[in-house]
Image (cartoon, rainbow, N blue to C red):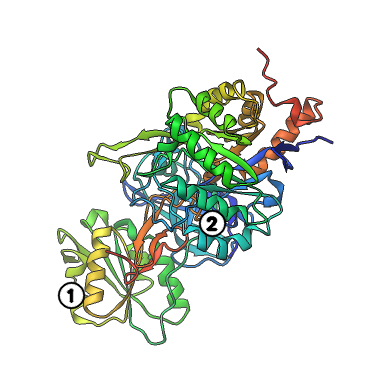
Amino acid sequence: MAKRIEDFTVKENRSLNKEIFVLELTSNSDLPELKPGQFVQAKVDGSPETFLRRPLSIHDVDYEKNTIKLLVQIAGKGTETLSKLRTGAVLNMIYPLGNSFSLPGENEKILLVGGGCGVAPLLFLGKYLNSNGYNPEVLLGFRNSDRIIEYEEYLRLATVHLTTEDGSKGDKGFVTDNPILKNTHFDRIFCCGPQAMMKAIARYSLKNNIVCEVSLENLMACGIGACLCCVVDTVKGHLCTCIDGPVFNIKELKW
Amino acid sequence: MVNLGISIGNLKFRNPVLTASGTFGYGSEFDDFVDISRLGGIVLKGSTIEPREGNPYPRMAETPSGMLNSVGLQNKGIDYFENNIYPKVAEYDTNVIVNINGSYIEDYVALAKRIDKLARIPAVELNISCPNVKMGGMAFGTNPDTASEVIRAVRDAYSKVLIVKLSPNVTDITEFAKIAEDEKADSVSLINTLLGMAIDVRTMKPSLSTITGGLSGPAIKPIALRMVWQVANAVKIPVIGIGGIMTADDAIEFLLAGAAAIQVGTASFIDPQISVKIVDGIERYLTDRGLSDIKDLTGKLLI
């Protein structure tokens, strides 16, 4: 799929909580076919402190409205600047970048596991799976009830199992403590979230012989496989998160 | 019509804009964004005889107006290059230059001999300035005796255009440029990255797995420009200017300081089309000023 460099216009910047916001963006050109798991490289403003682009995963796509959504957590100056973008602002993006989650086999029982702002790519994935005839279930984990984001969006899509670390909503504990993992056998898990959570889900998947793919978020400069900064250690040696990932089967990773 | 063509040794370039090693992959990464035949040349990612995994992650850190990297010459080795990469880059209608590296002089020589046999590679850039490897690299380029020895050995082994990439991590870079000239290199390119460091105050750990790394980007441009100016005044061989070039004006500064050509590096990470935009910008600058030849710029600094 050809990569593009394009100016997008902000249609809406919606704050979900103090740290997380959703940018809805549109372009004058028709969107190409995008795949769940892919990401964009957004140019913040080119100021000295936010010199490089920021890799952001695609949260949602609406081909009819010609819009894409990015769910972003403020993690530093770059994302803070993006959080202040208003309707009408222009955001230059290189996209679509990276591979995608793989399409499961027929009749597979699928679980999407997201933690914190790691829920970002799973909404697009869930919609994509639904439209391809799958009925995935969703397991979401947050620190506490104040941190819950996009819950209703996921409810519209699938059965959602909710976990908070302090038990203020849903089941108490980490996603790996959720009863759904004990009660149901899934054939395939797609996971995105903090690395500790993804590693725990990877261990669970290996133990229970479940196919598991995780979406990684490594520091990167170019996003197109030129700088070799975003490497991850795999059974095939150092691979680039930007072009060989961001989605990896856990059996490839040296975790 | 403006003439942008330049020569280094007996090698002609359609314009003075090249891409810097390690910032443009093997060219194909940029196929969706630029017509590579519009460039004067591309310098490929650093090669070694043996495959190398490079340094552990994290390998980069953003710093004000720049970035640190410690990739450590990750590449699949010369056998893979010859079989899988060379056939593709041989198709490019531009000068494709291989950046060569080694831990020992024998490695450099063996690699230069292999590359010499590749018909579509008209030049090598001898990297004696990589700051991110334990052996070789910058160690060769910061000691006059070893610099002299490795350049001489590669010169004897390699028949085509030899460019020596210099390290800025020395007291007097002109000393090394003169050594390259004395050892019959065709050109020097400078600067490689400056040795730098960043610390994450939240974790109290270094930002890079290797603790130190190479600083690139506009943060280093004034230093690079000063060094290019000093070197251009010290040697007769053509100088290729590198360091933080983000715009055509930046490139023109290097040309005025005495560079015959320039390389665009880190800027390609932010705008993958920037190299071609710089070609267009240089041409526009010449046209606007009623100049007809790029030679009207090189070294024309008014003092």
**Image quadrant where residue B289 sits:** top right
Q: In this view, does B83 lie above or below A83?
A: below
Q: Is residue B42 above or below residue A136?
A: above
Tell me the chain of label 2. Answer: A
Label 2 amino acid?
A: Tyr
Residue A11 seen: no
Badge 2 local density, few (<14 within 10 Å), some, or many (20+)? many
Which residue lies under the disc numbered 2? A95
Q: Which residue lies furthest to the right in this view?
A: B1
- Eye-nearest disc, 1 or 2: 2
Q: In this view, does B288 lie to the left or right of B111?
A: right
Front in this rendered view, residue B106 or B68: B106
Asked whether disc 1 touches disc 2, contact meaning CB atoms under 8 Å apart, the reply is no
Badge 1 local density, few (<14 within 10 Å), some, or many (20+)? few
Front in this rendered view, residue B295 or A122: B295
Q: Which residue is drawn at 65% across and 31% down?
A: B238
Q: Which residue lies furthest to the top in this view?
A: B303
Instruction: Determine the secondary structure under disc 1.
Output: helix
Looking at the image, is mark 1 or mark 2 earlier in the sequence? 2
